Image (cartoon, rainbow, N blue to C red):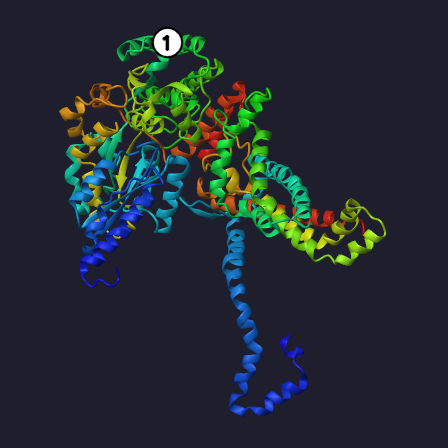
């Protein structure tokens, strides 16, 4: 190949090498990459690294990135999903990169749990107003937009998805347990969490080798976010960043429910977003899991093709709730803030967010996307063609934001460890609440 | 040193042969060159050994929060650590896992080395293969062991089940988690230590064994009376090395819980190194983490001293 003096020969060689690279990096699994960069190697395109987190299909940008890369020769997106876990790994790593001034991608995803800190440290971020993105204000519900605006008026983040709430369940196992398996009928089984627990007991009497719920943490979060909406939309911190774990009834209600489920032996004792949990999704360790919209992609990604048609989606006990949802920001350290802003703009456009929803299930925060008929009428193939548009989009407009403090990520982690610990037997049930409060105080300190 | 070892006549000769202008250069050559040649090690040591030591010592006296402020704290960090039950739990975990891993590992390595020291077919190939686990990436080892010790679908629980034992939750129960991690450590390091023991064994003069055979000592007796005492210097090295490795144990327990430095929901297998990592890189409490790192350093010094005294007595000569 070196003999060939024509540029075409060299380009072909570099294309081959790039393709080989793309193939080898694809084989590692969860990091989707486009094969497009090869063809435009000669023009030296700007590469924009998009960093995200989450299990399964995470932010669901695979198809959107492929599309962009095919259409834009001058800007190529490199989509890196760093890890399943936000509080444990992604956010600490990101904070290190942001404080040290190097290492972060050009566009980075931030979970709601990190937004308190992100907002307090505006010096980390580029101002998206400088790139004309203030015009996007009309696309988002006020709270989603406001949370991306720092105290000094800097626009640092654009909304991606929102939570919404549902229950993913194993249709085949419900049939096996002699329960109604149709999603309407399943939803009718459990208008409240007490009724959910009764169904769980009936299920557990019939089916021995599969537990009803995945573990304590997912249920705890679902109930916490529902209850938070009834208690002034706060969870661990009040709006002036005082720790209110022991004062907010939402926390105690969610904890009590998780504890009862665990004590009755209705949980598989798996901690969410771990390898064992992912394997358990695939191998049928549990029959139901609390599913905010973005969890659909996590479940389908973890379950794999074998799970197709076995899973379905039903409405959640106790009404709606808003667990999760993320933002995209451009770190100040990015060498190509203008192009990065363009990419962040593209990824949050109504069209992109709508396609992410129909392809993977993450509910758009973009109101235009929410009103898109394609979204409203969307069905999810993996979940037995469940009408996810109907399930999530209808309630999307009424969702309320829950305030999360600056130290939310640390406190959440400490509390989840106790909630998990009482399930796996390392924290006695009668001491769990006191330890939860103590550990939360320590983590907030 | 190098100057003294040169014969005086040669040095004088040296001086006379060169014109005066060059003298300083030749002196520089003789005086400074040796230092220049050994300096790379010391420069690297200063950058990656001494500087971090001083840096952590300095910051261990501050309340240094990466996401917040830095304030003088004196010995507050140390006082808080000594009262922190999580720190003591991590210390107990570390020491227990160290003992659980190292004692069987030393014995295994010793007997393995003894076996490899005999005349065998394909001796080189067999000796090399003992090192294989060491060249495997620790992440790969951890992934495999994580699956072996999985609660629901793991091979170990399956085998225990065949023997009628109830499945163990290897990440939730304290002692089982220690055993799982100690197994992982031994898998990686036994071969390495065996090779070092083997090298030590080969330096023992053959005539000792021949004399012992003539006196009618059995093979077993020769091992206890000749091999072990003669191996003492090697053993001191191996034990110190394992002490340092065991007390700074990090990668295996870390990967055993999805890269989460909590080491189990309630720190069942969190080591001190993980505690330091957690405080520094998840809670961003650098001062506290630095103080914990210094206490870990002290712990290693104590551990090394105990082991040194202990190993010195092996063979009964002292």
Side of B157 relative to A108 (left or right): right
- Rendered residue at 44%/18% (across/down): A267
- Rendered residue at 49%/60% (across/down): B47
Mark 1 falls on what kind of element? helix
Side of A337 relative to A306 (left or right): left
Q: Nearer the viewer, residue B238 or A414?
A: B238
Q: Chain of mark 1?
A: A
Side of B103 relative to B130 (left or right): right
Badge 1 crowding class, 10 Å Cα cut-off, few under 14, some 14 to 19, many 20 or more, is some
In the picture, the quarter occupied by the N terminus of chain A is bottom left
User: Residue B186's spot in the image, x, y percent?
Assistant: 59, 41
- Residue A185 vertical placement versus A290 (above, below): above
Q: Is residue A159 visible?
A: yes
Side of B118 relative to B79 (left or right): right
Which residue was labeled with disc 1?
A195
| Quarter of the rendering containing residue A89 | top left
Q: Nearer the viewer, residue B124 or A366?
A: B124
Q: Nearer the viewer, residue A298 or B275?
A: A298
| Quarter of the rendering containing residue B173 | top right
User: Residue A434's spot in the image, x, y percent?
Assistant: 51, 23
């Amino acid at each position: 190949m070196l003999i060939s003096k024509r540029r075409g020969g060299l380009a072909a060689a570099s294309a081959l090498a790039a393709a080989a690279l793309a193939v080898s990096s694809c084989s590692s699994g969860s990091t989707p990459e486009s094969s497009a960069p090869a063809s435009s190697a000669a023009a030296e395109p700007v590469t924009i690294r998009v960093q995200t987190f989450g299990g399964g299909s995470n932010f669901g940008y695979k198809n959107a990135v492929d599309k962009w890369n095919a259409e834009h020769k001058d800007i190529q997106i490199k989509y890196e999903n760093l890890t399943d876990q936000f509080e444990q790994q992604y956010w600490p790593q990101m904070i290190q990169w942001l404080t040290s001034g190097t290492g972060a991608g050009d566009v980075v995803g931030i979970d709601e749990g990190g937004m308190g800190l992100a907002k307090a440290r505006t010096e980390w971020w580029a101002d998206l107003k400088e790139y004309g993105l203030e015009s996007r204000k009309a696309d988002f519900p006020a709270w989603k937009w406001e949370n991306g605006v720092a105290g000094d008026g800097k626009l640092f983040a654009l909304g991606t998805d929102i939570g919404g709430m549902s229950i993913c369940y194993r249709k085949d196992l419900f049939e096996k347990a002699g329960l109604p398996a149709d999603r309407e009928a399943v939803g009718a089984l459990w208008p409240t969490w007490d009724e959910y627990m009764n169904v769980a007991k009936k299920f557990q009497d019939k089916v021995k080798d599969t537990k009803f719920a995945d573990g304590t943490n997912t249920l705890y979060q679902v109930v916490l976010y529902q209850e938070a909406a009834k208690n002034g939309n706060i969870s661990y911190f009040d709006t002036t960043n005082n720790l209110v774990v022991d004062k907010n009834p939402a926390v105690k209600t969610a904890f009590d429910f998780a504890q009862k489920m665990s004590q009755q032996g209705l949980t598989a004792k798996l901690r969410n977003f771990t390898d064992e949990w992912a394997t358990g999704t695939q191998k049928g360790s549990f029959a139901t899991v609390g599913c905010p919209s973005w969890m659909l992609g996590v479940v389908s990604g973890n379950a794999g093709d074998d799970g197709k048609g076995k899973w379905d989606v039903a409405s959640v006990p106790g009404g709606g709730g808003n667990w999760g949802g993320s933002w995209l920001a451009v770190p100040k350290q990015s060498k190509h803030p203008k192009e990065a802003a363009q990419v962040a703009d593209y990824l949050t456009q109504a069209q992109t967010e709508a396609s992410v929803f129909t392809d993977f299930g993450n509910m758009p925060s973009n109101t235009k996307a929410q009103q898109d008929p394609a979204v409203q009428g969307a069905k999810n193939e993996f979940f037995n063609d469940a009408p996810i548009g109907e399930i999530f989009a209808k309630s999307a407009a009424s969702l309320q934001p829950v305030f999360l403090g600056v130290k939310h990520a640390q406190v959440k982690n400490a509390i989840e460890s106790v909630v998990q610990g009482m399930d796996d037997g390392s924290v006695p049930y009668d001491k769990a609440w006191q330890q939860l409060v103590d550990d939360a105080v320590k983590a907030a300190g | 040193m190098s100057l003294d070892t040169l014969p005086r006549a040669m040095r004088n000769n040296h001086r006379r042969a060169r014109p005066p202008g060059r003298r300083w250069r030749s002196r520089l050559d003789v005086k400074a060159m040796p230092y220049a040649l050994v300096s790379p090690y010391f420069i690297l040591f200063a950058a990656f050994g001494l500087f971090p030591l001083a840096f952590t010592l300095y910051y261990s006296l501050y309340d240094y929060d990466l996401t917040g402020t830095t304030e003088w704290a004196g010995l507050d960090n140390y006082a808080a650590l000594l009262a922190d039950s999580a720190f003591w739990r991590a210390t107990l975990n570390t020491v227990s896992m160290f003992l659980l891993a190292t004692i069987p590992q030393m014995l295994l390595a010793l007997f393995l080395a003894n076996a490899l020291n005999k005349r065998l077919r394909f001796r080189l190939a067999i000796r090399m293969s003992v090192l294989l686990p060491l060249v495997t990436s620790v992440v790969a080892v951890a992934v495999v062991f994580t699956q072996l010790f999985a609660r629901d679908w793991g091979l170990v629980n399956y085998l225990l089940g065949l023997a009628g034992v109830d499945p163990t939750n290897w990440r939730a129960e304290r002692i089982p988690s220690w055993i799982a991690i100690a197994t992982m450590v031994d898998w990686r390091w036994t071969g390495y230590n065996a090779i070092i023991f083997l090298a030590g064994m080969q330096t023992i003069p053959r005539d000792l064994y021949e004399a012992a055979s003539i006196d009618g000592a059995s093979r077993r007796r020769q091992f206890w009376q000749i091999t072990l005492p003669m191996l003492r210097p090697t053993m001191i090295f191996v034990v110190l090395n394992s002490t340092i490795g065991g007390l700074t144990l990090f990668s295996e327990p870390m990967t055993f819980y999805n890269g989460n430095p909590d080491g189990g929901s309630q720190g069942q297998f969190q080591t001190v190194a993980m505690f330091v990592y957690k405080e520094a890189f998840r809670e961003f409490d650098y001062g506290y983490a630095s103080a914990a790192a210094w206490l870990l350093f002290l712990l290693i010094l104590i551990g090394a001293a105990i082991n040194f005294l202990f190993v010195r007595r092996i063979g009964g000569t002292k």
